[in-house]
Amino acid sequence: MNREVHFSPKQMRVLTWWYCDEWEAVICDGAVRSGKTFSMGASFFLWAQARFHGKQLGLCGKTIGALRRNLLAELVPWLRRLGMTVRERRSENLLVVRYWGHENRYLLFGGRDESSAALIQGSTLAGILMDETALMPRSFVEQAVARCSVPGSRLWFNCNPEGPQHWFYQEWILKAKERKALRLHFTMADNPALPPSIRARYERAYSGVFYRRFVLGEWTAAQGLVYDFFDPERDAVEAPADGFQEWRVSVDYGTANPASFGLWGRRNGIWYRVAEYYYDSHKAGRQRTDAEYADDLERLADGRDIRRVIADPSAASFIEALRRRGFHVVRADNAVADGIRVTADLLRTGRIAICRGCRDCLREMGLYCWDQRSGRDAPRKENDHAMDEMRYFAMDLVSGEADGFAAVAVERRP
């Protein structure tokens, strides 16, 4: 796409909304890859450099790394081609921009968790852009809004949809008019840079709640089966006999609750869950010790070279027991909603496959459902032990990949 000329009508509205004094904020929400992030970033810098000199402004993402990848990596070169002088001081998380004789400072912030609000507290800002707003805690967003006290300051929000009970949807999108915020809803059709083949790829990759949110751009509730597209009878595969290049094990540890281990083998770019271990202490009538579980994991490995064990991060004593036996153990990323998105993506695109011998994993996939009583995106805490360790494996798999399509579900990459 030639960013100099080819903007869609919706993107042009983002680029020019600030010429009118009617609005104090803009909200761009909707489908993934719909062109809202770039157009909002371009508009924000053009507005700031036209209206202010010698001021501080804020750029916020879920993390500073995500902000650089999702927004600045593509936007900064475009700003320079436009004639702006952009100097980055990475150690200070700061951009200094000069254009039209105006020079301003842009502070970079990450809104990962509740403690992040303290990072922005005390700053005085002339405006703020918040990328992936729905992934940030409310305390951080509200603190950022409170920092914009310079006369003429404005607010810029960008996000993909979550559930309809999400605080940002309830407090900002539904109340946009009373907050003097212009809400612009994006679909993939609003991005002229997205080829039809890539759009079709996204449409194939998602189903159920994720299709409605990421493709249709709807704020919709999660309901029904979590992996509603997966039919255990139809979609389980036979385990390849040989030819595996690497082995890993995923672990959900349980004492009173069931423990589940998955043995994964990589063959021709696909990771197969070829075997499993599942122990339910309630059914068995006794709990097992860390040493006994470590024995069980060794039997599951059956002499294979296990490159890494991805373990339940809360299982500190079991992790130590495995390390003493020489296993390379990493603590899993336990972000539930992100993990489910990534797992669903990997399953639908064929990057991971469940073999027919994994009976407990297949059983849980047919029972694993969203908890509609919780008011947030959370699965029911039942029939979820193999589901948890499968999610641990999926998150670990994409965390080391710079270009995996599945990573879109966690943090957008240019």
Image (cartoon, grey):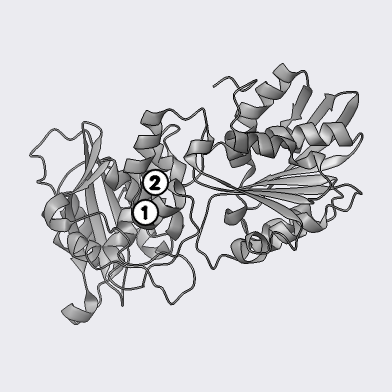
Q: Quadrant of residue 271?
A: top left
Place of residue 127 in the rendered image (x, y in percent of width and height, measured from the top left): 81, 46
In the image, taking residue 88 as reference, residue 395 lies left or right, namely: left
Q: Mark 1 sits on what residue?
A: 392
**Residue at the image point whose x is 39% and y is 51% from the top:** 211
* Numbered circle sitting on residue 277: none
Is the residue marked by circle 1 packed among few (<14), some (14-19), or many (20+) residues within 10 Å?
A: many
Amino acid carrying label 2: it is: Asp
**Residue at the image point whose x is 27% and y is 61% from the top:** 386
Amino acid carrying label 1: it is: Tyr
Q: Quadrant of residue 126?
A: top right
Element at badge 1? helix
**Residue at the image point whose x is 58% and y is 34% from the top:** 69
* Numbered circle sitting on residue 396: 2
In the image, taking residue 156 as reference, residue 403 lies left or right, namely: left
Place of residue 100 in the rendered image (x, y in percent of width and height, measured from the top left): 87, 23
**Residue at the image point whose x is 11% and y is 45% from the top:** 239
Is the residue marked by circle 2 packed among few (<14), some (14-19), or many (20+) residues within 10 Å?
A: some
Instruction: Name the quarter where the N terminus is drawn.
Output: top right
